Amino acid sequence: MPSFTSNSDIHLTRRAVPGGRWFAPLCVAALLGAVAIGGQEAWLAARGFVPTVVDSASTWAHQRARASELGHDALILVGSSRMQLDVDLDELQHLTGRPAVQLAIDGSSFVPILADLAADERVTGTVIVDYQDHVVGDLHLQDGSAAYLSEWHRMESRGSVLNFTTAEKWLDGRMHDHMRSFADGASPFDSLTLRLLDRQATPQYLVTLPDRERRADYSRVAMPQFYYSRAMRNAGINKIPPVTSWQALNEAISAHIAAMPVSDMPAFDGNAGIVSGYVRQIERRGGQVIFVMFPRSGLVRAADEKMFPKERYWSRFLGVVRAPALDYRDVPEMVALICPDGSHLDARDQQTFTKALVTAVPALRDGKMGVANPVAAQDPSEE
């Protein structure tokens, strides 16, 4: 029997196209959406909220790519939260005339990042390291740097492929970076319910900029609770006897710090030798590495100096590494700065610190080895 298709079958596959005028309703909907978004942005601004990006591994990887692309002129910042919070990138670039790349990662060791830079023959700029004694004491600290480096190497292996997906992601990210409704990775609905409709919600004290610089406004946190919490964590204090005043708490933490032993780091010299090898790799191709001890204040400084005496660790490190170095304790303008939480500078002091850093380290301006009051660097040939 011959096959056939009936007219009724054909009719079933047809779709009716709705008629009417759609342009005006679409314009009205777009206008209402824009008004809603604009109104929410204005409301968030009035409450003191500001745009801030999510400091992701992907964002870091794009900055890492710049470190390889910029060549000898690059100022590459490596370390942890102090590097992100204390240095004003715009001021650094203005004073030096050189592009700055922020590669510091909150709560991480500088060693894996320095090792990665040393292994990359394209990196020929100046690397500024936020030095911390305990990092050299243990090169196997567990932190988040591995995920950041993995993302960088994945991006590097894929190459720079421009397609619709990557272009859309880039444009979406740029829009979110400048809108308060998406601050800290929130959605507009989150911002509405958790920030605008919650009268107890306070503006964020910590802001991350698109270039990964961070700014802290400590007037927005509860003091001195915030300070003492940081001091206790830095000193490894989990619990202290009940106290009846802030003065009593200060005395209790001070007494604990006074009784603390000097940190024993038997692998320190050997690890410093490993770091020295990374420095030599970068120097051989015309780059340089400068180590900087960043400011501390109050009980945080007291605990660090008790656990890591300068002559036992910082001086020994420099003797092994033989690289330019700067200790904030040798720069009056830096010593005068107060870290509100004992560990980091307020955004209002970023420019002052950055100016003092550039003044004390001429190499940041002219690219030549050396710092003010430097520790003499031994010629590698003298080993």
Image: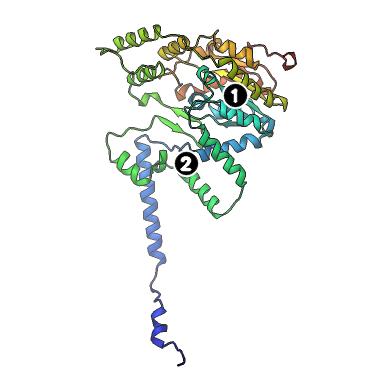
Residue plotted at (69% across, 19% down): 369
Residue 299 location, quadrant: top left
Image height of 38 relative to 366, above or below: below
Question: Element type at marker 2?
Answer: helix
Question: Element type at marker 1?
Answer: strand
Give, as a three-letter code, the residue at label 2.
Asp
Residue 186 screen position, x and y as percent: 38, 42
The residue carrying mark 2 is: 177
- Examine the rendering and report whether any part of residue 364 can be seen: no
Residue 347 screen position, x and y as percent: 46, 25
Give the CA distance from mark 1 to mark 2.
Answer: 27 Å
For marks 1 and 2 on the same chain, the one whose residue lies earlier in the sequence: 1
Give, as a three-letter code, the residue at label 1.
Ile
Residue 261 location, quadrant: top left
> Which of 76/337 is in front?
76
- Examine the rendering and report whether any part of residue 150 can be seen: yes
Judged by depth in the image, the label closer to the viewer, 1 or 2, is 1
Image height of 338 relative to 217, above or below: above
Q: Are marks 1 and 2 in contact (CB under 8 Å)?
A: no
Which mark identifies residue 128? 1
* Quadrant that contains the C terminus: top right
Residue 145 screen position, x and y as percent: 52, 32
